[in-house]
Amino acid sequence: MAEGKGYNILYADPSLCVGCRLCEYACSFSKEKSFIPSLARIKVLKLEETGLDVPIVCIDEKVAPCKLACPTGAIIKDEKTGAVKVLYDRCNLCMLCRKACPFDIMVFDRKRRRILICDLCEGDPACVKICPTGAIKKLPAESAPYNKAYAIASAVLIARKAEAIVPK
Amino acid sequence: MLGWAGTILKFDLSSGEILKEELESSFAKSFLGGRGFNSKFIFDSLDPSVRPFDPQNTICVSAGLLSGTMAPSSGRLVVSVSRSPLTGYFCDGNAGGFFASEMAQAGYDLIIIRGRANKPVYIYIEDENVEIRDAKNVWGRDLWEATHVIQEEVDDLRTQVLAIGPAGESLSAQAAVICNLGRAAGAGGMGAVFGSKNLKAIAVRGSKGKRVARSDEFNNIVLNILNRLKQHPIFETWSQYGTTMLPSVMALTGNLTVMNWQKNIIKDLENLDGPSFYPRYIVKKKACDACPIHCSRFYRIPDGPFADTMGEGPEYVALMSLGTNLGITRIDAVLYLNTLANKLGLDIAEAGNTIATAMHWWQKGLISGKDTGGIDLTWGNVDSVIELMRQMAYRKGFGAILAEGLVKAATVLARSKGISEEEFTRCIYGSKGMTLRAVMEWREAKGVALSFATANRGADHLRGMPCLEVYAEWYGAKSPELVREWFGVPLEIAKKWFSLNLFDRNKYGGKGYMVKFFEDCYAAGDALGLCRFITPWRLGLGPEEMAMLTTAATGINFSWKDMLIIGERIWTVEIAIQRIYGLGREGDYPPKRVFSEPCGEGAAKGKVLDLGRYEAMLDEYYEIRGYDKNGSPKLEKLKELGLDNVVETLKLKGGL
């Protein structure tokens, strides 16, 4: 497997995110030709009382839980780009992949009855291009192992700085 | 019809009836959306006998044509009422945040609310599913709690909630409606109209998406604009500090307002300047929907008496209205007041200016501790401001008198004290019953002065302030080409301004051209849902870019001149409403004070407005607009704008 070599992953930094959601628009437009954030493969979570904006992306880690969970082999990893892909003819919509995703970032398109996952836009992600603060980056997979941890840690740090009272 | 969400949603809270109507295409093309839809709808259904708290007073809530798309800074919401409890006339408020785009995503361009529910309710909209729900769990709560409880009730934190606080429930004339906890449609006491209808909030969630007619073209235009924005000379600073960079700049031009507009300078101003308070108080940067500028910020007070207070803001208006204009220069106090106002659901500008006026009355000895219930209204007394704000929101004590609005409060106090009303009203710095929301100087730049007075919803900068009169020089925009490049003013218009020397702030002549352009251009921007900061106000999307975006979104060709005509049409409809209410030329004057009292200490010291020259400037402005001497639109003008039904209505209702 070519995992970790030669391909990139997405890294979204909550400390730089200003919560404008341009990435959701750009993502949905590049995939659906419509401005439909509900089908965006990236989500910006906003915790308003603490001012926190957390962009959640699929970071296509080496061990994709969605891929492991899929009973029909419908989720594969593209060897070239490293992105997770769904083979729709094999998918039986059991939703196990969605349950397995630690970030609940997979989207179910109710209208067309299909699972949507970030495919890194064939190596040139629309969200990275549109982000006005550089909060979403494309990084080499070699640097991957700790990036997600850092992203979460910095979110927690900002929340602590703002003395987070996340609604119960 | 591509480009628009396509549906108008109508509520009658008295009967509980909910109607969905398809958007009509000629209405859509002529008024585009947002403020255009609201104003025209209110005009068409106007009943001049309706009072502010009558069930039949209409609330219109609308998203812009571009809201819910990737167009930059396009998520502005417009809330209008046919009668404002503050001014007694037509009024609207404009808010950022995420409500407008969510509404467009749910499929609605315009929400119309009439009637009065027999118990507290809130409206819940999730795409097709529309309900009027019992608000027993949220009525009586502060605005932040109410927002949360509703989000919990519908079990979705992404649901956008536009709510009122205690101020709206108690029908305070300074009540705002607020979304995203701090994004207020503040002008005109809209919150009280919600309150009078027993309507606590509107919650909306949309997942339908928004399609544009020429999608690739639209996308390319947006990407081009985003690239260009980043090259703009002011982009860096503006995205970093936003309006918090303004206090020191305003002081330099003599536009800072101190102690109810008595001076233009104050000691320790640097405390309120973004660059000096950012490191200690600002946690992170914030943006509204689809906004690359992200001028907003989130604060947390680390220590002191207000420790752990958090919130979004403050904007320049808060730094003035809750700061210098009250004689306060403690930033932690201003931040605390900012949060408090949002929780109470008070409009920061009107509430702050109202207290400033009361402090001015106190300074002049017109009122004393006996009238205020022992509250000491000395300039800069933070505790008193906090107490008075609570009183205004809950209608208690002295605050209950102020909650009627300054004009009524002046009458009540004058009568009870046996002092002439003139003494009280002289301190009110505003027009059409609204204090100057700009919190800038009225006597400094003459075009700005005209725009504050002609602003058709009440004394306001957002209606038509020709910012470039004040800023162009400061930016170094010294040629028509630069004015076009940086601010988006079409070359033809910029050239005219230069040939008439309109950038001279002390000049009266010709300013009507500038003011009309800005009024029309901003009205078009409000119809599209664009933020002021991305119009010629600051970072310069002008009518040309607006036309390109509108064309690509709708597939109908619009030129930049069309955009200005649409703006003019909206403006004129609004004027027609005010004229039917009987508000004529006399409403388009600044407060008397600015003609007789020169500016106090500061860079504008000694400047005063000359009444005779102001009258001439106003005459010229009306002429440029195609209005008569009383400021009413002439028949030819109405016909030229395609407003034939306005002609008929004006004739019937006595406005023509």
Image (tube, rainbow, N blue to C red):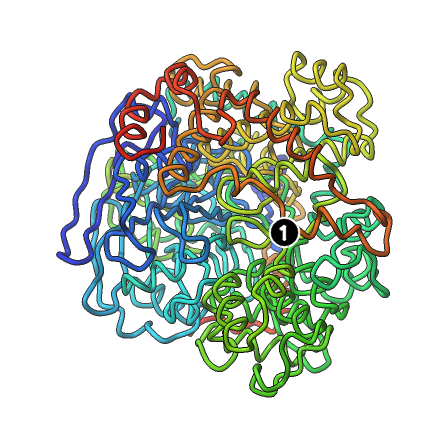
Q: Inspect this view and state whether residue B157 appears.
A: yes
Q: Secondary structure at mark 1?
A: strand
How many numbered circles are shown?
1
Q: Position of residue B614 (x, y in %)?
A: 67, 35
Q: Quadrant of the N terminus of chain B?
A: top left
Q: Looking at numbered disc 1 in the image, what kind of residue is underneath it?
A: Ser
Q: Position of residue B82 (x, y in %)?
A: 34, 46
Q: Position of residue B133 (x, y in %)?
A: 22, 63
Of residues B175 and B654, the one drawn nearer to the viewer in this rendering: B654
Q: Quadrant of the C terminus of chain B?
A: top left
Of residues B220 and B263, the one drawn nearer to the viewer in this rendering: B263
Of residues B38 and B299, the one drawn nearer to the viewer in this rendering: B38
Q: Can you say whether B65 is above or below B18 in the image?
A: above
Relative horizontal placement of residue A57, taking residue B203 as reference (left or right): right
**Residue marked by disc 1:** B296
Of residues B203 and B393, the one drawn nearer to the viewer in this rendering: B393
Q: Inspect this view and state whether residue A160 appears.
A: no
Q: Can you say whether A26 is above or below A165 in the image?
A: above
Density class for disc 1 (Cα within 10 Å; few <14, some 14-19, many ≥20) is many
- Name the residue at 47% across, 64% down: B408
Q: Position of residue B554 (x, y in %)?
A: 38, 21
Q: Chain of mark 1?
A: B
Relative horizontal placement of residue B442, taking residue B209 as reference (left or right): right
Relative horizontal placement of residue B174, taking residue A72 as reference (left or right): right
- Name the residue at 44% across, 76% down: B395
